[in-house]
Image: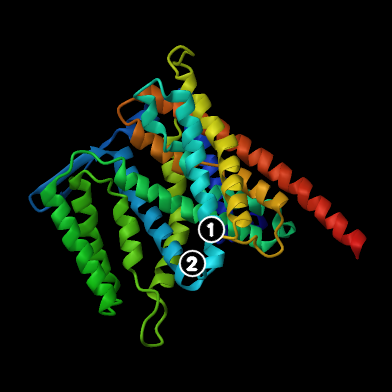
Amino acid sequence: MNFLRRIVFWLQQPEKASGPLTVGAMITAFLMVNSSFKPIYQLVHHTPVAIRFGSLMVEKPLILWINEGLMVFFFLLVALEIKREILDGHLDTTARVALPAIAALGGMLIPALIYLLFTWSDTAAVRGWAIPSATDTVLAIAALNVLGAKVPPTVRTFLLALAIFDDMGAIVILAAVFTDSLSLVSLIVAGAALLVLILLNRTGVTRTSAYVVAGLALWFALLQSGVHATVAGFLIGLTVPLRTTGRRRSPLRAAEQGLRPWVALGIVPVFAFFNSGVGLFDMTAGKLSTEVILGTALALFVGKPIGILGFGWLSVRLGLAQLPLQARWSQLIGASMLAGIGFTMSLFFAGVAFSSYGTLAISAKLGILVGSVASAIFGIVFLAVITGRHIRQSEQDA
């Protein structure tokens, strides 16, 4: 009974439980694909699922519904977090925004350049330049939580803000780059649905059903338009009102708190399970792209911290930003290493970029696994050593 109580208590803390669940889902997928359970995994993976709206019907494999349907809620939660932090949180002043924003820019540009250095001669492989640009917020924070209270809260805030800006950049890349041939009619419908959402916000409407109906219309229109449908989640999140005129609970905070456990404990692990099935038994080294594997792994493990620290240090030197209170550069080095944990977001981009290139997708996934695991291990060990030294030094000074 005590064990069951511990499990229940653990699951009631989505931020702590999501990391281990996601890693467990990835390991399970990897083991299934490389065992006698592979046919079952592939059957579920490619099961066709149809959705009908009146005379309109869309049929896609289950994996695509997860990537373009369930992940909408992930990006919706990201948008809600970003809006709350900017309007009423850790990013509500220019000084607080500057360092993680500029550092995140470096954390996207340098990894992309490192990836391109390895793959520039292969026009198909170049499509994956955005794979190492994003950070897995859930796993990065989970890795930081391993150290508990030893790390100053401002370092956690920096990493969280950095990941948030990474996600914003990912949304921009997704909408601007990974867009197929566009349907003008669908884009007009999507624009009309977005306008309705904005009007609902501006007129003070807080009824959830109104946002759900308009949001579904926006998502379905984008699904048909050629723009990746997950962008709908981000746009919907930005229109949810933070405050109301009366004493009612904040709609944005209510939506965020309601979504968080579903996303953390359900959607992210399910996404990881369906996108982490890398088969090794039927692969030969000659079929894999060494350039993509090395480019992805080194972009995450080396490019992320170099970009984040380089741009961050430069912004402080130029007076554009300030170090967080109680934080030291050595601690930010460790945090920037943890930002190299790409996992779910990088897997998402790999699926989008290499949807028609199976071998390149597998190569990218291997690179993501290597780079993310290395970033997690080295980041945790580095921070543990640094914080230990700081604690001993503080005790001696006292």
Q: Which residue is mark 1?
A: 161
In the image, taking residue 346 as reference, residue 1 lies left or right, namely right
For the point 36% across and 49% down, the residue is 172
> Is disc 2 placed on a helix, strand or loop?
helix
Q: Which mark is residue 44?
A: none
The amino acid sitting under disc 1 is Ala
In-front residue for pair 260/84: 84
Residue 240 position within the rendered picture, expressed as x and y whole percent measured from the top left: 34, 69
Q: In this picture, is 291 found above or below 221? A: above
Residue farthest toward the front in the current orientation of the protein:
318
Q: In this picture, is 336 found above or below 189? A: above
In-front residue for pair 171/1: 171
The amino acid sitting under disc 2 is Glu
Q: What colour scheme has been applied to the protein in the rendered image?
A: rainbow
User: Which of marks 2 and 1 precedes in the sequence?
Assistant: 2
Residue 92 position within the rendered picture, expressed as x and y whole percent measured from the top left: 50, 70
For the point 35% across and 64% down, the residue is 238
Residue 163 position within the rendered picture, expressed as x and y whole percent measured from the top left: 51, 52
For the point 64% across and 51% down, the residue is 144
Is residue 334 visible in this depiction of the protein?
Answer: yes
For the point 45% across and 72% down, the residue is 87
Q: Which residue is mark 2?
A: 85
In-front residue for pair 70/101: 101
Residue 355 position within the rendered picture, expressed as x and y whole percent measured from the top left: 32, 31
